[in-house]
Image (cartoon, helix red, strand yellow):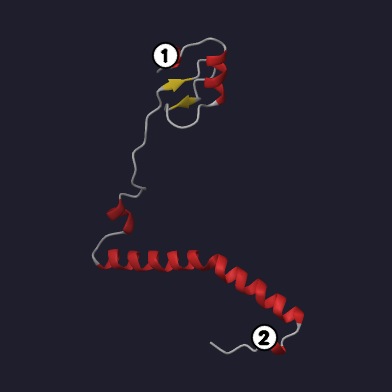
């Protein structure tokens, strides 16, 4: 990398350099991830697999099935974990029991 003499640069050149450095820092992690992914894909290919063959094609993790359904809109469900959706809060405020909303 060439040495940069900051003392001889104009304010406009310094501001431009600062913007370039900020962009490079922001994109650094993405560049490193892309390089790592390319290396992993190449290694998997050398062994006769695709990377998705080895990883199952999706992120590891457990999916929790819904436990509650909105009787007014069956497309709205809730697993019972995390924050209560507004429709659950409204039903409870209206005097319904959580068991009445169970699937």
On the image, which quarter does residue 91 sit in? top right
> Label 2: few (<14), some or many (≥20) within 10 Å?
few
| Residue for badge 2 | 6
Q: Position of residue 30 (x, y in %)?
A: 49, 64
The structure residue drawn at horizontal position 42% and vertical position 26%, both measured from the top left corner, is 80
| Residue for badge 1 | 99
Q: Position of residue 14 (x, y in %)?
A: 70, 79
Q: Is residue 21 left or right of residue 51?
A: right
Query: What whole-number distance in Å separates the C-alpha atoms at marks 2 and 1?
Result: 69 Å
| Quarter that holds the C terminus | top left
> Label 1: few (<14), some or many (≥20) within 10 Å?
few
Front-lying residue, 73 or 88: 88
Q: Secondary structure at mark 2?
A: helix
- Tell me, yes or no, whether the two marked residues, 2 and 1, touch with CB atoms within 8 Å: no
Q: Is residue 35 left or right of residue 90?
A: left
Q: Secondary structure at mark 1?
A: helix
Q: Is residue 4 left or right of residue 11?
A: left
């Amino acid at each position: 990398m060439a040495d940069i003499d900051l003392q001889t640069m104009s304010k406009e050149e310094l501001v431009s350099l600062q913007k370039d450095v900020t962009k490079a820092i922001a994109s650094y992690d993405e560049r490193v991830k892309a390089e790592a992914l390319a290396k992993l894909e190449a290694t998997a290919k050398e062994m006769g697999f695709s990377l998705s063959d080895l990883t199952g094609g999706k992120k590891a993790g457990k999916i929790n099935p819904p436990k509650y359904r909105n009787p007014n809109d069956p497309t709205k469900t809730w697993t019972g974990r995390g924050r209560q959706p507004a429709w659950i809060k409204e039903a409870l405020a209206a005097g319904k029991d959580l068991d009445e909303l169970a699937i």
